[in-house]
Amino acid sequence: MPSREFYTMPTLRLVVAAPADVQADVVVVPVPSEGTVPALPDGLTAAIGALRDGKELKGEPFEMHWLRADELASPRVLLLGAGSGASMSTDVARRLGTTAGLAARSRGQGHVAVLASGALQAEEHVRALAEGLTLAAFHVDAYKTKDRKLADLQSAAIVVSEGAASTLADAVALGGVLGEATNVARAVAHEPPNVLTPAVLAERAVELFAGTPVSVEVLDEAALRDKQMGLLLGVAQGSVNAPRMIVLTYEPDANRESGVGSRESQDAPAAAPVLGLVGKAVTFDTGGISIKPADNMDRMKYDMCGGAAVLGAFHALARVGAPCKVIGVIPSVENMPSGTAFRPGDVLTGASGLTVEITNTDAEGRLILGDALWYARQLGATHLVDIATLTGACAVALGRVASGLFGTPDTWRDAVREAGTRGGDFLWPLPMTDDYKELLKSDIADMVNAAGTRYGGAISAAIFLKAFAGDAAWAHLDIAGTAWADEPKPYQPKGPTGVAVRTLIELARSAGSWA
Ligand code: BES
Ligand code: MN
Ligand code: ZN
């Protein structure tokens, strides 16, 4: 089956113009809940004033009101509530961008222009608007052959007034890169599991990075056997779709970025940091012999969102670079029940030599990540982050809002958290003390793979992973609750969210501050 087009990149532009002169299908006017609206032709200003006086438009975030626009070069105006100017943030700006883009598309309009004035004209808000507009180009119904609901988003302009900072065009371009990287992850995540097997995922990675500064190596089943990755192979053995391990490498260009750790100093130079990004890519998780219930099992095609996030992050690194070396390791398997499947009771030996007693074949993500974390360290990673749709327990604890964050040392965990804040991913730290370790005690092997209790399920999973991180700085993001949107919002359609992509990009690009 040919691969489908999940998004086309809209033409993104920064436009310096008076609102009346902007050419688009719709001009989006953000309306704050207090304070002044941008300077507009008189009739429009009066119309907005009347709506506000009549409390028909309060300016609350994502409120929408459409008008015909006789005084503008564009035929229509969308008044879009923007909240109070004082509380403008990159998160709100990004969501305004996506809301504007999706609203235009839902009315069959492919050319949108957003007026950025006041607080929205700040560089980081313009960047976030561009990001959000790009996110709006994603379509969730790429497999529909007819009755597609939304028009393609062909162009998006961010309109600023004369005298705006000259750096804003760069901010728009960077927003486009970040948004597209997120869409890359969402597109892979949205492929059905019959199409996206581990082998196909690996081919996609090769295609994605052909001709870029990112190199791709794919370990097939024979290579994995050679490396004695018994945890990953144990999960994979029940499926006819053979496993893969995708390895991505980005080396900073010495001429473009100053290499962190290579700066001159009197002392012996510190070893250069190597960031290792490890993403769970279970292309379908039935649970294996410990099979899952039928309800919503189709969702388990998104059990590869961690791996997709790593691919998305590298897509941006290939274009805008980072000051440190970055390695990506994506272990990919399908978890199936069959006559050849691994079973509860089996003991697996991973590449690190640790032995694991299988108590539940549905706790497969931690097994493949165990071998992958170990491998990332073999490849020289000094700072690890793994990303995984790992536990239902994490979704129970934090809902669909925050992703679970674990890590050690605290400074590294906090660096990841701050990168998340900058990137627009809300990460919330969960505890991980030695007292939890007994949850994974095995009578016959080094550890069990699944604790005997559901209590603290996100934490026991994290404790398991830590055993494979050795002495490297390590952080773990559990995105089980956040990788998929169940309820559509004005700024997020139902479907894959691309969570963690921008956290990883921010982290790599800010290596100077944590290394
Ligand atoms: N992929 C699932 C986790 C998951 C569950 C993600 C729901 C998104 C939504 C993972 O492989 C899994 O099955 N985890 C088990 C672990 C348990 C058997 C210890 C879980 O969460 O129930
Ligand atoms: Mn599972
Ligand atoms: Zn899983």
Image: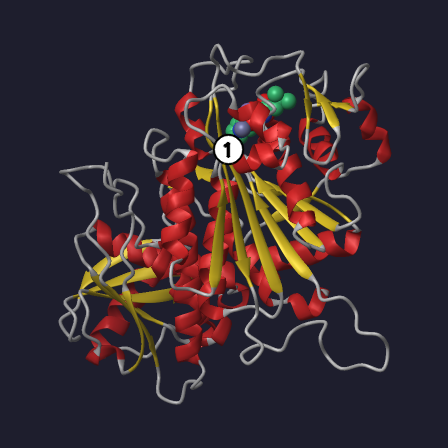
Picture coordinates of residue 195, whole percent (x, y): 32, 33
Q: Quadrant of residue 64?
A: bottom left
Ligand 1 falls in quadrant = top right
Which residue does the image show at 62% across and 48% down from the upper left? 427
| Residue, disc 1 | 221
**Residue 113 to residue 459: above or below:** below
Amino acid type for the residue under numbered disc 1: Glu
**Residue 51 to residue 187: above or below:** below
Q: Is residue 183 visible?
A: yes
Q: Quadrant of residue 326?
A: bottom right
**Residue 220 to residue 285: above or below:** below
Quadrant of the image containing the C terminus: bottom right
Residue count near mark 1 (Cα–Cα under 10 Å), binned few <14, some 14–19, many ≥20: some
Picture coordinates of residue 238, whole percent (x, y): 49, 19
Q: Is residue 35 visible?
A: no
Which residue does the image show at 86% across and 77% down from the upper left? 267
Picture coordinates of residue 433, whole percent (x, y): 83, 36
Quadrant of the image containing the N terminus: top left
Q: Residue furthest bottom?
A: 163
Image coloring type: secondary structure
How many dots with numbers?
Answer: 1
Image side of residue 136 versus residue 481, left or right? left
Which residue does the image show at 79% across and 73% down from the upper left? 269
